[in-house]
Each structure stands twice: as C-alpha cells, then as structure tokens.
Image (spheres, rainbow, N blue to C red):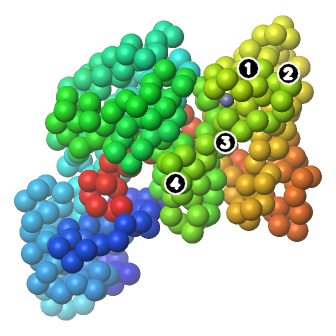
Amino acid sequence: MTGGAGGSHRLFPDARVLRPTTKRLPQHTRSHNRALVLQTLYSSGTQSRADIARTTGLTRAAISDLVAELMVEGLLVETGPREEARPGKPATLIELDRNAFQIVGVDLSDAATFRGALLDLDGTIVDREDVALDGGTGPRALDTLLQLCERLVARASAPLLGIGVGSPGIVDSQGTVETAPNLGWTDLPLRTLLAERFDVPVIVSNDADAALLAEFSFGDTDNDMMLVKVGRGVGASLLLGGAPLVGTMNAAGEIGHVVAGSRGARCVCGKRGCLETWVAVPRLTAAFDDNGLDWRTPDGLAAGRPLLAEAGRRLGLVLAPVVAALNLTDVIVSGPERLLDGPFIDAAVDTVQQRTMRTYTGDLTMRLTTLGDDIVTRGAAMTVVSRVLGFS
Ligand SMILES: [Zn+2]
C-alpha cells in the first residue's frame, strides 16, 4: 500500500473498519472523500500525501486540501520527513493523532454494574469508572447512567469525540432503546437524552452489536461470525460478508427469548424456558446456589460442571439451526470466563454438531473473546469513531 524505503508503521495495527452499509449520494462526495482519507490513515498508519492519493485514487490536489482541513480540526498531524535512501526531497509523513480526541464508552450489559471508560481514538482505555446498580431499574438506572457519563465527561483530558453506549435489549437506528426488560426500559430515547445533556455526538447500540464491532476491530476473526453475549441476559450479533446484520425490526441476533426447553423456568418476557432462563449469568449462579455449590471456588466450580454443560447444551439447541442456515464456522462467546470457558462451550459445540450435518459444522469453532470484560465498552467507543469519522 505504501512505498518508500522508510516504510510505514501502522498506528492501529489491529484495527479494521466495517464495510460501509449505506449508499452515498453525489452531495456527500466531500464527506465521503474525507472519510476515505481518515479510513486510510486509520488502518494503514503513517503515510505521505502521495501515498494517500495512490491508496484512495483521489488527486494530489484534493488530498492536500482535505489533509489541510483535517489538520486544522486536529485530527491529523505531520510527523516529519520520511527517511529514505532515494535522492530528492523526502515526503512529509502524516498520521491520525490518536490523542486528539477521547471517547466515553459505556457498557450497560452487566447485571450489577454499569462499566464506563474514557478511550483514545484507537480504542485504548485511558481511564475507567464502574458504578454499582444496586438493583436499580427504570428511571433509577437512567439516573445512574447520566451521573456516570457526567463524571467521565468531566475527566476527559482531550476534546470529546462523542459518547458510545452499549445497551441490552432492542435498540433502533435512532438510538432509542425500544425494550430492555432487564433494565425496565421501554421506548427510552437514550441517544437524544444524552446528546441534549452533553452536546456531543452520541451513538447507542445493542450491547452484542457493540461487542461484535470490538471483536471485528481488535480480535482475530473472519468476515462471517456470530457473537453470543452472555450477561444479565443473552443476546447475539451477526456479521455476514463483513457487514453487520440489523434485521427488519432491529432485532437480528435476539436469541435470548427463543424457547430452549418448555420445562424451564418462567422468563421476564412471560414465557417459560427461554434461552436466558438457562444461560444468563444470574440464572447460572442461581443454579450453583440451589445445589449448595460456590462457583467462585475451584471445588464448587468442578462439582458444578454438569450444570454448566446443561446450560451449554441449551445454547447449542438454539444455535444449531442458525449455524446450519448461515454456514457459520466462527462463534465468539463473551461473558464470565470462569463460567463459560470449558464444559459450557464444549457442550454447546457438541450439541450443534450432533444436530447438524457434520460435513458443514465439523470445523465449527466456538471460543471466548480475547477482549475480556472491556469488549462492549471498546465496541461502544468504536461505534462513535466509525460514525463520527464517517467510516459507516
Ligand atoms: Zn423470555
């Protein structure tokens, strides 16, 4: 992509950007070109103006113009001349200034805690704060979120690019939480509320969708994958051919309320035996409690292996037709490692393979994300980077 003996280092070595999903109109050409320049520097690191022109296919004059504009905004910086063996005047290198802005990322998916952080443009966490929910739902949970954002915004040490929130439940394209039963929220215009309060761009997305973006940006995954998020509830998100699947009613991946055995417990949705009632973290820990086992101790965890395998089997029952229909080979699981890594995931894979054609699902890999507990926070921040810088 770049020439020159000095080469180029990649500022964001692991970051990828999603394929744009919207059509562009002629009047958007300038913002499209701007996004192309940012995207090129975001994924390729340091480049000269000539490099950027070659990569994007735009003219040198257009690139000089756009680079000047982006430097005034503080997004790009010149890093000096390229060291090269060739004779002649060396080209001046340019890169995205990762410290130019910060982003507030918030993860609302945990049963007991809202997790917040301040992040660099490349998704690195520079400061964090968690706040206990103390069982609060509805307006109380909203108030807890607003206070958390207030404190994080106040602590930012660079201009704020925006606020990204990963919420459980169904979130529409305008950032309204249509329904999040576990938080007691219905038709909550969360994006509008936060944008009016803090006067910065705000992106609210489903927690599993945010996690998927983080996994795609920083993890080691293919262009086709499913991410299953196990927390207070159970949700999933799908990436097909490098594009995220939204669904007609914004509810693609909502597998939590698929019945996985009608003998199961009553669910918050009113049905009996939903996947959540078998697999959600509070249900898993309650199953340990009911059997007099402590999942926090090695002995308790070992004795509870059959409970975890049974929960994994229920997940497998629900995933089998999805994996078969979409010919998926890559399923990432996000949630507490202690509970999910081992018998839970093993039983889920076994169940999918038993119930499908092994020819197509024999290579199925299901594994825990390497991004740990920060996956939704980092993904939520990346939704802001993508949207505000024009990547999607
Ligand atoms: Zn349900």
Which residue is the site of mark 1? Answer: 266
Horizontal arrangement in the rendering, residue 24 relative to residue 333 (left or right): left
Q: Position of residue 270 (x, y in %)?
A: 67, 23
Mark 4 Cα-neighbour bin, 10 Å: few <14, some 14–19, many ≥20: few
From mark 2 to mark 1, how far is it between C-alphas? 22 Å
Mark found first going from the N terminus, 3 or 1? 3
Q: Amino acid at mark 4?
A: Thr
Q: Amino acid at mark 3?
A: Ile
185 shown above or below 81: above
Which residue is the site of mark 4? Answer: 248
> Which quarter of the rendering shows the C terminus?
bottom left
Q: Secondary structure at mark 2?
A: loop
Q: Position of residue 176 (x, y in %)?
A: 37, 37
Task: Look at the image and tell me whether residue 218 can be seen.
Answer: no
Quarter of the rendered structure image containing ligand 1: top right
Determine whether label 4 and label 1 are within 8 Å by CB.
no
From the Cβ of disc 1, is ligand 1 less than 8 Å away? no
Q: Quadrant of residue 358?
A: bottom right
**Residue for point 61% across, 42% down:** 254
**Residue for point 31% across, 54% down:** 387
Mark found first going from the N terminus, 4 or 1? 4
Mark found first going from the N terminus, 2 or 3? 3
Which residue is the site of mark 3? Answer: 255
